[in-house]
Structures are given as C-alpha cells and as structure tokens.
Image (cartoon, helix red, strand yellow):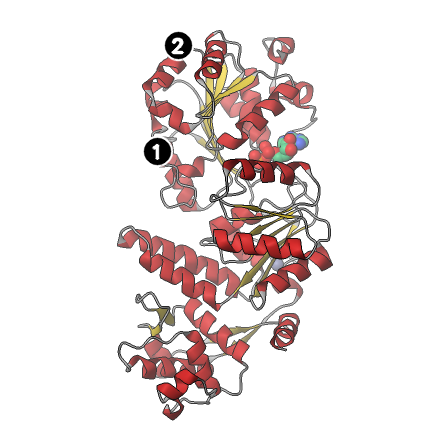
Amino acid sequence: VRKAALGPHATAIETLEKVFGYNSFRGQQAEIIQTVIDGGDALVLMPTGGGKSLCYQIPALVRAGTGVVISPLIALMQDQVDALSAVGARAAFLNSTQDSAERSRVERAFLAGELDMLYLAPERLRVSSTADLLDAGHISLFAIDEAHCVSQWGHDFRPDYLQLSMLHERWPTIPRIALTATATDVTHKEIASKLQLGDAKHFVSSFDRPNIQYRIEPKLQPLQQLLTLLRTEHPGDAGIVYCLSRASVEKTADFLVENGITALPYHAGLDARVRAANQSRFLREEGVVMVATIAFGMGIDKPDVRFVAHLDLPKSVEGYYQETGRAGRDGLPSTAWLAYGLQDVVQQRRMIQQSEGDDAFRRRLSANLDAMLALCETIECRRMQLLAYFGETSTPCGNCDTCLTPPESIDGTIPAQKLLSTVVRLHRERNQRFGAGHLVDILMGKTTPRTTQHKHDQLATWGIGQDLSEQEWRGVVRQLLAQGLLAVNSDGYGTLIVTEASASVLNGSRPVRLRREPERAAKAARKSKV
Ligand code: ADP
Ligand code: ZN
C-alpha cells in the first residue's frame, strides 16, 4: 500500500528512493520512465543487468491504475511478485499454474483497483475472458518484457507474442513499454513492427559489459579444459556451463561432481520439480555450478555468476551474447569462456541443412552461424567484434583473449590448397563418405584400415601435410569451413565438399589467411596429445 503512502503526486525519483531505496537512476532509466509516465510508448534495448524492471515498475507505481506486465517467464512470476511485495508494492500474477480460486482472487483484486502491477503470461490473452477482464479494470500501462520473443527468427520465439499487437488495437490510449536485452538491428526493427510500436521512442543503451572477459579456445579435451578453468580461476564460484544436448548436460554435470565441484543439471527433460529445485539451489546457495541447455537462464537474476562457459558453439552471436551476459551482473570481473572445435561447425551446418522451414529460414540460420564463426576465428578484439555486431563502434578492450595474447594471421594458401585438392580427389569416389578425420589422415600419411581399404595411400596428396600437426590440420579444416571455402554435404554424414569459392583458391587466384593460435593455446594442444 506504498502507492497510497507515496501520495497522488509522487514523482519518479521519490518512488525510486522511497520504494526501492536507490538514490539515482542509471543510464537512460530516468528518460524512459518519464516517457511512460507522460503516456508515451517506449522501446527499450538494454543489456542484462542494466535495470529494465524499474523502467516499468516505477511508472506503474506513479500512474493511476494497474500496470499490466506481459512476461513469458512463468516460473519467475512468484519471485517477482514476492520481491515487489517485499518493498510494499501490490502485485499479483495470472498464469496457468494457478487454480481457479487463486485466479478469481487476483481478478477481484485487479477489478477493485487494489493492484499496482499484474503479471500476465502471454497465453492468457488467447482467451477472450482475459481481455474482458482487462476492459473492466483500470490499466495504467502495458509492459512487454522479453520483447524479442516476438521475433520469429530468434531462439526465444513465442507464438503468443505475435498477438500482442492486440494491446495497441484494443487499448490505443494506454502507454506501452517493450523491453529486451537483445540488440541486433533486425530484432529491433522486428519488435517495433510486430508490436506496432511505430510511435514509440527508442532507447538503445550501450551493450558493452566491460567486466566480462571474453575468451574462445580450441576444443581439445573439453571437460578437462573446463575443469582447469574452474579449478585455477573460479574455485568455489557460481557459474553456468552451457551444453547443446541433454545427454551432454548430464555427462558434464556428473564429471564435475566426480571432481568435487558442486554441479547441478538443468534441461527440459528433467522432471519439473527437479528443475525447480536445482534452479532454487543455484539462486540461493553459494558456489553452485549449473550445467544446462539454453532452456536455463532467461530472467534469472543472480548477480554473482562469475563465469559462463560454453562447451558447444552457440547458434548465433545474439544467443552467445545473451547467455554470456548472465555473468557478472554485479559489475565485478567475470569470465565468458567458450571451447569451440571442428565438430561444432560440421554438426551445426548439418543441423541447418536438416532443419524444417523454407530456404529463407535456412539462409538466416546460416548467416547467424557465420557471424558466430567469424567471432570465433577473429584475430581482432572479441569485444570490438561483438559490439560491432550490435552496431556499436569501439576500440580494442585490452581485456579479452585476443587483446591479451594476440593470435597471428598467417598465409594459409598452400595448406588450403593441399586440403581442398584432397577433398576434390575423394569426391570422385562416388557414394563414399569421408569425414574430416579421414582427410587429415591422408594429409598426414597415416595408415588406417580405411586408408588401406580405399587405397588412399596412392593418392597424390598422401602424406603431403606432414609439416603441420594433426591438431593444426583440424584447425585448417575448421577455418575453411568457417570461411565458406569448404562445406558439409547434405548426406547427413558430415562429408566435406568444396564450394564455388574453393575454385579460386585451388587455381591460386585467391589467397587464404588463417588464424594461428597464440602460444598459450598451442601449448595446451601439445599437452593434450600426450
Ligand atoms: P535487467 O532486467 O535489465 O536484467 P534488473 O532490472 O534485474 O536488470 O536490474 C539489475 C539489478 O540492478 C537489480 O538488482 C536492480 O535492483 C538493480 N538496479 C536497477 N536500477 C538501479 C538503480 N537506479 N540504482 C541501483 N540499482 C539498480
Ligand atoms: Zn579485446
């Protein structure tokens, strides 16, 4: 009942101080909040931890009526409502987890004007009784949280978000504020158009997270590499380890537990109660490592996550940025670490080929992957490249792996030619399926049952690659794949094929630049071979 205590003419800054106990606004908060208090629409792009919640909570407290907050994060609604109640704001939610008695209690409170904020799952708006309910009450504003869920191209797409344009159609005079931590230009435009935010003021914050150190390493023995990271740099720290599949989540969590680390699994295949229990331990206990698929993390407000590790390549820079952004919300030094290898590229290219959807959809996925690969293979500052992806220009940060131990760019034309001509020769053997490992065996002149069976020791390129190590050859394959000079066949076996662009490399008209791992990583590579 703070709203009453605040009086009818409380200002934004009074509300910030008296309700939330802070003394100044951060970044663009003041401007955003004033826009909404004055009845205007706002579209807010702000990184994770930037302070988006206050941007709608304060206007909801200052304006007369109830602020309706649309959020996909059903599992977190109770926490959000509890947090607001703790500071004396009157909040409630409506979602599918409630029984009808609870629902009617909330509905009555809303109709009686006793709520400052009402959290609503988007699917609630599918039923017409919800719209009727909203009509019968007094709404101060609509907040659309995680607004990027409206993007059909994004990884968090929620079909129910598409119908949120109805908010504007049905209640044209009520101000709306849409918020997201996703920052690409494409998503930005898509949110504006799909949610009919044509007249909204846009607030785009810098997406730099200076306290996060970005590091991307070649994937050699990923579990060992992860363990080394945790033991040497993050003993006892809370963190998140992302894996692509449920199976690898389980395997990784088991491995960490066997090695004395408090690790818990989280993926959609686990029982809902186990998931909830693990999430709550992660939030409440200290030093818990959550091993999870990307099903985990959106909306998780844990300030002291000290590291986010990826054992598999994210599908897009946007996804990578969102996931790594969960580290260091408290502003203290944190690590974003990714191990990335040849198999990641092969697997993801294959997944794109086999994905449902039309050509345009697959092209979009490919473009997302290419941008992610460019970030992995860059010899420039990671942060600069990351921010450039979001349209921000910056200078080398001095705090990422490429700034701290710069990799070299070397002329890789001859290795590329050796590799590509082997691929061309193998391609002549129709219906045969040879993956990257076999290619490298041929270049190294390493006899295996398969090289003998197919008489590959007779190929002109047999053993011509002994000047590089096996690891280095895998790096060449990976980088040619990343540069589009090699492709993965659609046979589903990961067979490598040449592309149109390969011809110019083979005939010598196009030089190839390759990234050479700096000494630190090269040492690790040598060790792992022992
Ligand atoms: P986001 O939703 O953008 O990820 P939150 O709204 O959860 O970020 O805010 C992140 C943290 O910063 C929260 O703990 C919040 O209380 C705090 N915070 C937000 N705005 C301010 C402010 N003006 N002054 C101090 N702390 C703030
Ligand atoms: Zn840097």
Q: Quadrant of the C terminus?
A: bottom right
In percent of width and height, residue 226 lies at 63, 59
Q: Amino acid at mark 1?
A: Leu
- Which callout, 1 or 2, points at the residue further toward the start of the chain? 2
Q: Ligand 1: does it lie within 8 Å of the C-beta at label 1?
A: no
Q: Amino acid at mark 2?
A: Ala
Neighbours of disc 2 within 10 Å: few (<14), some (14-19), many (20+): few
402 sits left or right of 316 in the view: right
In percent of width and height, residue 115 lies at 53, 13
Neighbours of disc 1 within 10 Å: few (<14), some (14-19), many (20+): some
Residue at image position (64%, 71%) is 524
In percent of width and height, residue 504 lies at 34, 78
Which residue bears the numbered disc 1? 162
Q: Nearer the viewer, residue 96 or 77?
A: 96
In percent of width and height, residue 183 lies at 48, 44
Q: Nearer the viewer, residue 195 or 309?
A: 309
Q: Quadrant of residue 1?
A: top right
Which residue bears the numbered disc 2? 136
Question: Residue 50: in sight, yes or no?
Answer: no
Residue at image position (46%, 14%) is 101
Q: Ligand 1: does it lie within 8 Å of the C-beta at label 2?
A: no
13 above or below 296?
above
Between the C-alphas of marks 1 and 2, the distance is 24 Å
Q: Quadrant of residue 492?
A: bottom left
SS category of the residue bearing label 2: helix
Residue 15 is labelled as none
Residue at image position (37%, 28%) is 164
443 sits left or right of 507 in the view: right
SS category of the residue bearing label 1: helix
Q: Nearer the viewer, residue 56 or 239?
A: 239
